[in-house]
């Protein structure tokens, strides 16, 4: 509509940043005595989980990691799942363990996440790793926010001293991202569904992160001109053509106000798997060093 003077935000595509992170992980993996080994466990046939696990397994092999997938029946008991986790914990040939979420209702996610050896916890969800992250000593940290931080570095977006606002406080994205931004010396605000006048909060942001899961929640009036906007949302919508496609939490018109903007799809999405493999290499490096 011309209100922004016709500027268009610099696009921040994920694939080049993901490729750089993967190349770095592959080079580090090649320096180890044997390829890092990731074990991925899933229960049931939830289509999204099946597809995420397939993507993680395929990419792991592509970059020269060893990957094993345990596809267990939906009705696997919590005791049997915990027994498998215990076996993987004890296996010196396994460097990383990932249990794909969500789990069926009869299994406690918390019980499973607590059971994974923190040294093999490549998703970074074990309370020891959550605590180390918040203490400013991250070792294995959640993949989506860690991938976002890598991407900001890749595109030389300054973080130290910036006003950062995150919309969303999940354990997977919002909370760990807040810890990472704080560790990187941003001034951090976390907004959520009980935040009154969300726009007044988001307009303060030099760095604005939308991790909500609501189609186009962030509109141009909520964005400070020139801000960097990172759209973490992945929402399935049916377009005018009747076909399903993916869209983010940020309205496309934000491109006329923001200084830089991540697209959906093709934005932060590819960084998550790349960071998972980087975490697996980190776990393998530390286990190798501990055995010396
Ligand atoms: P959750 O549903 O766990 O969390 C959503 C958060 O958004 C909650 O903190 C909620 O607040 C907040 N929220 C909901 N509605 C509003 C609102 N109207 N205004 C302000 N805040 C609101 O989602 P996730 O963090 O798991 O995922 C968020 C999005 O990111 C999803 O679209 C998901 O698909 C995507 N995602 C993408 C990944 C990737 O790119 N690889 C990985 C993980 C997620 P409250 O806490 O008060 O309920």
Image (cartoon, grey):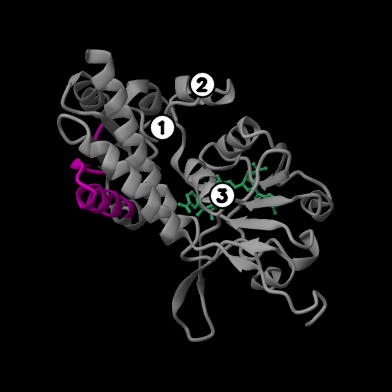
The residue to which callout 2 is attached is 132
Question: How far from the left and from the top, in percent, is residue 191?
Answer: 72, 44
Q: Which badge, 1 or 2, comes first in the chain's sequence?
A: 1
Q: Can you say whether 33 is above or below 214 in the image? A: above
Q: Which mark is residue 167?
A: none
Q: Secondary structure at mark 2?
A: helix
Label 2 neighbour load within 10 Å: few <14, some 14-19, many 20+: some
The residue to which callout 3 is attached is 152
At horizontal 80% and vertical 65% (from top left) the residue drawn is: 221
Asked if residue 66 lies in the magenta stretch, the reply is: yes
CA distance separating discs 3 and 1: 31 Å
Label 1 neighbour load within 10 Å: few <14, some 14-19, many 20+: some
Magenta residues (range): 52-78
The answer to whether mark 3 is within 8 Å of ligand 1 is no
Quadrant where the image shows the N terminus: bottom right
Q: Which badge, 3 or 1, comes first in the chain's sequence?
A: 1
The residue to which callout 1 is attached is 109
Q: In this orientation, does residue 100 appear?
A: no
């Amino acid at each position: 509509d011309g209100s922004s003077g016709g500027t268009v935000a610099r696009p921040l595509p994920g694939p080049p940043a993901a490729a750089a992170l993967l190349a770095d992980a592959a080079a580090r993996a090649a320096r180890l005595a044997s390829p890092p080994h990731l074990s991925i466990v899933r229960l049931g046939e939830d289509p999204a989980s099946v597809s995420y696990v397939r993507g993680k397994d395929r990419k792991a092999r592509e970059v020269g990691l060893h990957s094993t997938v345990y596809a267990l029946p939906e009705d696997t008991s919590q005791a049997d799942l915990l027994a498998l986790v215990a076996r993987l914990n004890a296996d010196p040939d396994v460097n990383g363990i990932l249990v794909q979420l969500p789990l069926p209702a009869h299994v406690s996610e918390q019980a499973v996440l607590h059971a994974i050896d923190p040294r093999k916890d490549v998703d970074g969800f074990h309370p020891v790793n959550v605590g180390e992250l918040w203490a400013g000593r991250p070792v294995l940290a959640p993949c989506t926010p860690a991938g976002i931080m890598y991407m900001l570095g890749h595109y030389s977006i300054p973080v130290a001293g910036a006003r950062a606002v995150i919309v969303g406080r999940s354990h997977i994205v919002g909370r760990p991202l807040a810890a990472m931004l704080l560790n990187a010396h941003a001034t951090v605000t976390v907004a959520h569904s009980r935040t009154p006048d969300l726009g007044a909060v988001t307009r303060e942001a030099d760095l604005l992160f939308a991790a909500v899961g609501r189609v186009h929640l962030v509109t141009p009036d909520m964005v400070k001109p020139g801000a960097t906007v990172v759209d973490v949302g992945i929402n399935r919508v049916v377009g005018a053509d009747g076909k399903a496609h993916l869209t983010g939490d940020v309205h496309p018109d934000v491109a006329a106000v923001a200084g830089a903007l991540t697209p959906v799809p093709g934005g932060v999405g590819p960084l998550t798997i790349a960071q998972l493999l980087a975490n697996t290499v980190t776990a393998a490096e530390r286990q190798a060093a501990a055995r010396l």
